[in-house]
Structures are given as structure tokens and as C-alpha cells.
Amino acid sequence: MSNNYTSRVAQQIEQYRGIKDIHELPEIFHYWSNKYLRERLNSVIGADSIAEFYANALIRVAQRQNNHLTFVSLGTGACEVEISVTKALLAKGVDSLKFNLRCIEISPLLTERAIRNIAEAKLDDYISVTQMDLNDWSPPSDSIDAVIANHSLHHMVELEKIFDAVQHSLRKEGAFITNDMIGRNGHMRWPEAKVWIDAMWPMLPEKAKYNNQLKRMESTFLNHDCSNEGFEGIRAQDILPLLVERFDFEKFLAYGGLPDIFIDRGFGHNFDASSDSDRGFIDFVQFLNDKLIAIGEIKPTMMFAEMRLRGCSDCRTQYLNLSPEFCIRHTTPD
């Protein structure tokens, strides 16, 4: 590995040292997700939460199998999501089929935290965690029933190698399930989306322009590249095209774009979820986002996807016209 890669690994590990809950989000995010994302998640994915999304997909895998089930989760952090998924599976009766969930995490800090979390949840019989760089992951062929990746793919450099490993390891009845970022590298806005953010920025009160993550006031929107340190969004824009090349999609929900800026950790804490005007602004941004995505002017930045090996599925559920192919933001002319 190069010195640059080693340095980025160290930055990635250090990034989460003092963060107790890496999934914590502003209250305005929950207002937006409950009003807009939740209904779409219900209708397209048939789930009411992220844990249920993964659990339901794993149950569908279990229904196609009659043997002990092996699930793998890639880039698990402290395993909070995996613990919730396992609890959901047990609550839905999957225990009778017997399964284990093998977690892979690069950070020794988060691996230690995951081991503690699993023990406290008394789920050692179902969940294990291994500290490993996914670039070194090479599972045996036809050995895994499902692979999940919750907001981890956008940290991965060797996407082709990892997706090929998933292809190689999945049984015919298996599935690859993910909730992740598919926007521009470094979570930047593409030019056609940034022009709308720039137009809305003067509408914001000064307090809303403070970047809570970078600890700076932004009188004009600064299109920050998060991939300059660590691996945040390092190849986000390549995720969807590479998946489309390799897998068939059974369920696909694409969302996000303009609202991300105003509801995420950077600026989201500046908005009051109990304020009519703040909620009204988020409603306006979401309305505009839906219209622009529908006509192909901008592309979604996030997705839920349940995939199968090529030729193993002949059906697809998606939201409106937002197919995986439609949602790809091409970086070169067609």
C-alpha cells in the first residue's frame, strides 16, 4: 500500500475516535425523513426503518434457503445497525433457521467498541466482528447468503475488487443489500445542483450559514470536498454505475440531492424542526428537488438497494421513473 493510502487509513480511524454515535443526525433531518423518505421506504422497500429494510431483505433470502445462513456486513463501525438488524430478525422468527452475521471493520477502535456492544446486547451467538481492510477480503466462492453494506461503500477505494468479491461469494439465492451515497465524489454538488444551492443561499438567515462540522461561517456556499482527508465519499459517484454493471436490482429507492445540504450534520443543526418557517424551507427544497430529479436535471445522491446476482431475478420495484440506470450521473457525454 502507498504512503498516501496508509495516511488516509490513519485519518479515517482517527476521525471516529471521539464520536460516540456516528449515526446521530440533526432534528431537522428526522422531520424531513419522516415526512418524505419514510413513505417512500414503506411503499418501495416495504420497511419502516433502516434495520427493518435489512431484516426484511435477509428474511427473503432465508425463505429461498433451507440451510444455516451466513451473512456478512462490510464496514460495520461499532455494529449499532447490525445489532438492530439481528434483533429485528430474531423478533421476526428467523432464529428457527439459524444464522450468523460476520462483521468486517477496518478501525481497531470501532472493532473494540463493536465487540463491547455485541456482548452488552447478548448477541455473541449471532454476531462476530473481525478487524480487516476490505481490500484484503477474499471469501470462498458460493459461501455467503447475503452481504450488507450500510453507508460504508462510499469509504471504499477498491470498489471493483470488493464488488467482484461479493459476486464471487454469493450463493445463487443470495442478495447484496445496501443503503449508501451515490452522489459526486467527496459529497460535493455537481454543477447543475450547485447552481440551485447558490440561488437559495441568500434566502438563508446568517445563523443558517454556519458549518457545524468545519466550524466556519459560509457567506457563500463552499462546495467542500470531504474526500481530501480519510476516505469520505472517495468514489461515491462510481458506486451506482459499477453495481448496475454487475447485479440485477430487485428493490431500488433513490433520493436526496438539494435537501442534503440543509438537513445533514454540516448545516442541519442550524434549522429548528419546531419552526414553521424552517420546516417550510425544507418542504420547498424537497419540492424543487423532486421536480428537478423527475426531469433528469439533477440526480439523486442516496439509495436503498436490494440486489441479486445477474439472471437470478426478473422483477424490480422502484420509485416512479427512478430506475438505477436513470439515476446514474454520467461524467462523460453519452
Image: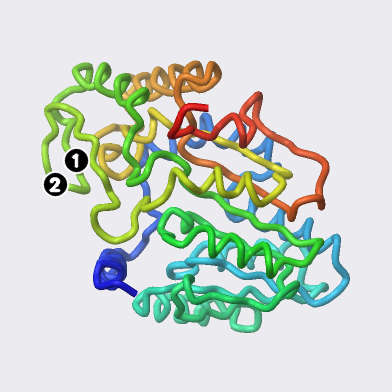
The image's mark for residue 211 is 1
Please report the residue visible at 66 percent of the width from the left and 57 percent of the height from the top.
176
Q: Callout 2: few (<14), some (14-19), or many (20+) C-alpha neighbours within 10 Å?
A: few
- Quarter holding residue 149: bottom right
- Residue at (84%, 75%) from the top-left corner? 67
Q: Which residue is mark 2?
A: 215
Q: Secondary structure at mark 2?
A: loop
Q: Specify the amino acid type for callout 1.
A: Asn
Q: Secondary structure at mark 1?
A: strand
Q: Which mark is residue 10?
A: none
The N terminus - image quarter: bottom left
Vertical placement of residue 250 versus 88, above or below: above
Work out whether residue 285 or residue 176 is closer to the camera in this orientation and state it: 176
2 or 318: which is nearer to us?
Answer: 2
Q: Residue at x 73, y 53 (%)?
A: 308
In this view, the residue farthest toward the right is: 66
Instruction: Say what amino acid the circle numbered 2 marks.
Output: Lys
Look at the numbered discs 2 and 1 and tell me whether their residues touch, using CB distance below 8 Å. Answer: yes
Give x and y (percent) for residue 33.
Answer: 49, 36
Name above or below for residue 238 compared with residue 67.
above
Task: Pinpoint residue 287: horizontal percent, then vertical percent.
Answer: 46, 18
In depth, the one of 22 and 28 nearer the eye is 22
Residue under the image location 41 percent in, 74 percent down: 106
- Residue 51's spot in the image, x, y percent? 59, 55
